[in-house]
Amino acid sequence: MKYFSFSLALALLLFSPVAVSAAQFEGAEEYTLSSERVVEDNLYSAGTNVIIAGSVNGDLFAAGSNVTITGSVSNDAVLAGGNVQVLGRTGDDLRVAGGTVIIGEDVGGEVLAAGGMLTVSNAADIGGKAYLTGGLITIGGTFNGDVLIDGDEVRFDGVINGNAVIKAQTTFEIGDNAVVTGVLKYEAPDVVNIPASAQIGSVDFTKITVGDRTPDSDMISGSFEDFFKGFSVAFKVMRLLMLVTTVLIFFFVFKSKSQEITEEGIKEFGWSLLRGFVLFIIAPIAVLVLLVTVIGSSIGLIIGASYILMLLLAKIFGAMLLGALIFKLFKSKKDKKETLTWPAALTGAIVFWLLGLVPVIGWIARAVFMLTALGTILYLWYKQVWMKR
């Protein structure tokens, strides 16, 4: 229980209206921080397309379908989106997740990055450790700390002033300009060809078969044990970033519908929760019954696909509903502003993720908001689609 209280208190402290005075919340479907602007506080921004061309003298949190950073960030940067380009300097740590991720400038601290296609360009200089995971990973630049890379295809032609652990599921390539001053430990299906011009301190190779991502016990001994522990944390952070991205994108793209769902969910919370619980129990049974019949199998597939989609939407709108309720606690009864704002949506995503870290109680709380959102979606569909058919 104490962990639940701590997580909730932490989220409220960081993201509640009390903390807004120490940060700027800005968002739009097309959001741009112009090159002339300087933000002296932390900046939280979101939109379908987000461009940060100005300077942020604090932390930057940005999420969107496309996120491009060409300005400078003095402290940490946390970025998530479909396509993310970091083309400006980050003063401290960088946390980034996306379908396509490009890191093209200096980072003063650590880097934690995940992407379907992840690239660190030759111009980048990374000040601390780096944790990189993805599909196709292309590495240039200079790393002034230990590096952990886990990908399907890994192409390395940069400089690592430290140790490197690299896991390549299918392909691992080392370029002519590659440098590793410490130990290179790598897992791959085959021994990598190391060019004569490459400078590698020492090499430790472990052969793996395709689909095998279990590290050899020797790979996680000594100083590398902490590295893999950090990598586990990295995946948790990536899940948070992707949830924040999805929630904020849905908020800006489907703002009126998001507002309607949260307002209805708050107004009829009990009934919505009951509807969601009933649907959660009955729908899978109905799908199974239909699938075993010749005539109903196609209908069962359609209902099953619709049910899965509704569950995914329930997670997104459940997080929004949670954020709207948290912000409502700080509103006076005279405040008639809209129920759901984008800071509230952001708060909901953060707290929803934090609840997932709390065994039993946290999971139950998440389930309550998901089922409430599910019941609300069902009710609005019945009212606006089925009744008007």
Image (cartoon, rainbow, N blue to C red):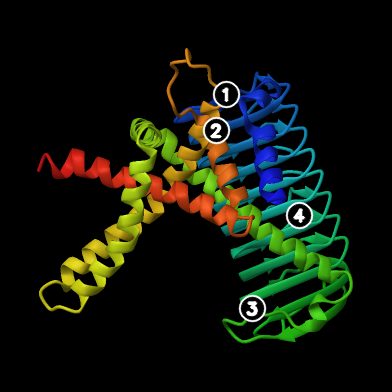
Query: Mark 1 and mark 4: span between their CA atoms?
Result: 47 Å
Residue drawn at x 88%, y 63% is 162
Vertical position of residue 368 compared to residue 306: above or below: above
Residue drawn at x 33%, y 62% is 281
Residue hosting label 4 = 141
Of labels 1 and 4, earlier in sequence is 4
Choose between 251 and 315: the one closer to the eye.
Answer: 315
Residue hosting label 1 = 330
Q: Are marks 1 and 2 in contact (CB under 8 Å)?
A: yes
Query: Mark 1 and mark 2: span between their CA atoms?
Result: 7 Å
Residue drawn at x 77%, y 35% is 75
Residue hosting label 2 = 326
Q: Judge depth for marks 3 and 1 and give the one in front.
A: 1
Of labels 4 and 2, earlier in sequence is 4
Q: Quadrant of residue 293?
A: bottom left
Neighbours of disc 2 within 10 Å: few (<14), some (14-19), many (20+)? some
Which element carries disc 4, helix, strand or loop?
loop
Q: What amino acid type is highlighted by mark number 1?
A: Phe
Which element carries disc 2, helix, strand or loop?
helix
Q: Is residue 107 left or right of residue 307?
A: right
Residue 74 drawn at (x, y percent):
77, 32
Residue drawn at x 81%, y 60% is 159
Q: What amino acid type is highlighted by mark number 4?
A: Gly
Q: Are marks 1 and 4 in contact (CB under 8 Å)?
A: no
